Amino acid sequence: MTGLRSLSVLGATGSVGASTLDLVRREPEAWRLVALTAHSNATELARLALEFSAEIAVVADEARLPELREALAGTGIATAGGPAALVEAAARGADVTVAAIVGCAGLAPTMAAIEQGGVIALANKEALVSAGEVMTAAVARHGATLLPVDSEHNAIFQCLQGNNTAHVRWITLTASGGPFRDWSWEQLSAATPAQAIKHPNWDMGAKISVDSATMFNKGLELIEAHHLFPVGLDRLRIIVHPQSIVHSMVEYRDGSTLAQLGPSDMRVPIASALAYPERMDTPCAPLDLAAIGELTFRTPDEDRFPATRLAREAAQAGGAIPAVLNAANEVAVAAFLAGQISFTRIAAQVEDVLNAYMPVAPACLSDVLAVDGEARERARQLMEAA
Ligand code: NAD
Ligand code: MG
């Protein structure tokens, strides 16, 4: 790549954040770091801010600000704390902002970055699922460029290059099926958090690992794809592909199917977004198909994994419903990780919240945040009543 570009990483201490900074570390001459943010790990955030000479380090949990301040005192790196500071840091603008916060907590800062009109490399799928048209309209209004980092969407984006979406017959999202893809309903009912966060192919944060086990990850990705590639919901489908080598596919009207393949390493899609429209080196192992031997595919089982059905219905309903689905899932995943509900209750509880009420479609960011807040409250009430 040529020229120095500025970069902010929202969620710098997470799995996607770490993979991003690993690539940046290999090309220090190419990047100038603006904002690095974290939820609460002030020590790690300070270490990264120093290593990359960031302009500002922001910790969302304000209680950790004194620790961050002390760690960066005398370095010339600005520090700040709290959700509003996160939004201000994102609003400093950068040529590229990697949105890698987990959950709807990343929505407001991502929207602030969009308003600056740069490239948004989006990992934070929950933000797009919740905000939907509110986010895509902001992208258009501010002339921002939304590049998908989620491996499936990055694959689809690549398979669409140079083609007219009017000729798309199918977009097929691949799903690993998660660690429980072959488990019976009885086994699923007794699945523990430790088993759920041990993904067979990918090394990811706890929330997305649970989403992967329930298939809510693919459900959220279906809604994400619906906004990123508006070919119509009936042209989007999901196929289980346990090896996670084919990251997704696009079939055209003439019968040609284009697929993107690669190792199960997030540095590949992240690099594709960072360098777009160029390409950059990554340290990822080259694809050795002879060693992999077999690539297999099967139809998802929505009886054992109802999440993709719930997500498709939410996408069809549109308006506020995807935000309700996302919020209810975030609450259920946190409750499962805390040992409060069983694995199979996650989808059941999301469905209960979806059936409980019908909020009006959000028109702006604060509407989306209000829908998110109310859905969380209702999810908690349902849990207490159970
Ligand atoms: P993670 O849990 O490893 O990291 C999350 C980051 O967000 C951390 O830096 C954390 O400090 C920050 N954060 C968490 N809660 C916050 C809050 N309330 N306010 C501000 N910051 C907060 O998660 P991850 O696996 O890196 O995933 C990040 C996003 O990328 C998720 O939306 C996930 O679905 C998506 N994604 C991840 C992967 C992957 O391989 N990890 C792949 C595709 C998409
Ligand atoms: Mg994905």
Image: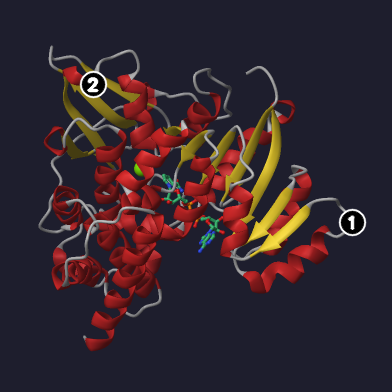
What label sits on residue 165 in the rendered view?
A: 2
x and y percentages locating residue 281 in the rendered image = 58, 22
For residue 74, the mark is 1
Q: Amino acid at mark 1?
A: Gly
Q: How is the image coloured?
A: secondary structure
In the image, residue 297 lies at what x, y percent?
19, 35
Image-quadrant location for residue 232: top left
Instruction: Using the rendered view, name the quadrant where residue 22 is placed.
Output: top right
Label 2 crowd (10 A; few <14 / some 14-19 / many >=20): some
Q: Which percent across, then down, holds residue 156?
A: 31, 28
Instruction: Bin the neighbour count of mark 1 within 10 Å (Cα to Cα): few under 14, some 14-19, many 20 and up.
Output: few
Mark 1 residue element = loop
Query: Is 293 drawn above or below residue 131 in the view shown?
Result: above
- On-image quarter of the C terminus: bottom left
**Of callouts 2 and 1, which one flags the residue occurring earlier in the amino acid sequence?**
1
In the picture, measured across the screen, residue 284 lies left or right of residue 379, that is right
Q: Is residue 181 visible?
A: yes
- Where 60 falls versus 119 (above or below)? below
User: Front-most of 10 and 369?
Assistant: 369
Give whichever of 52, 360 is nearer the camera.
360
Q: Amino acid at mark 2?
A: Thr
Name the residue located 11 percent from the left edge and 36 percent from the top edge: 234
Find residue 118 and name its label. Answer: none
One can see residue 180 in this view = no
Residue drawn at x 52%, y 52% is 109
Q: Nearer the viewer, residue 6 or 38?
A: 6
**Where residue 311 sits in the image (x, y, percent)?**
20, 53
Ligand 2 shown in quarter: top left
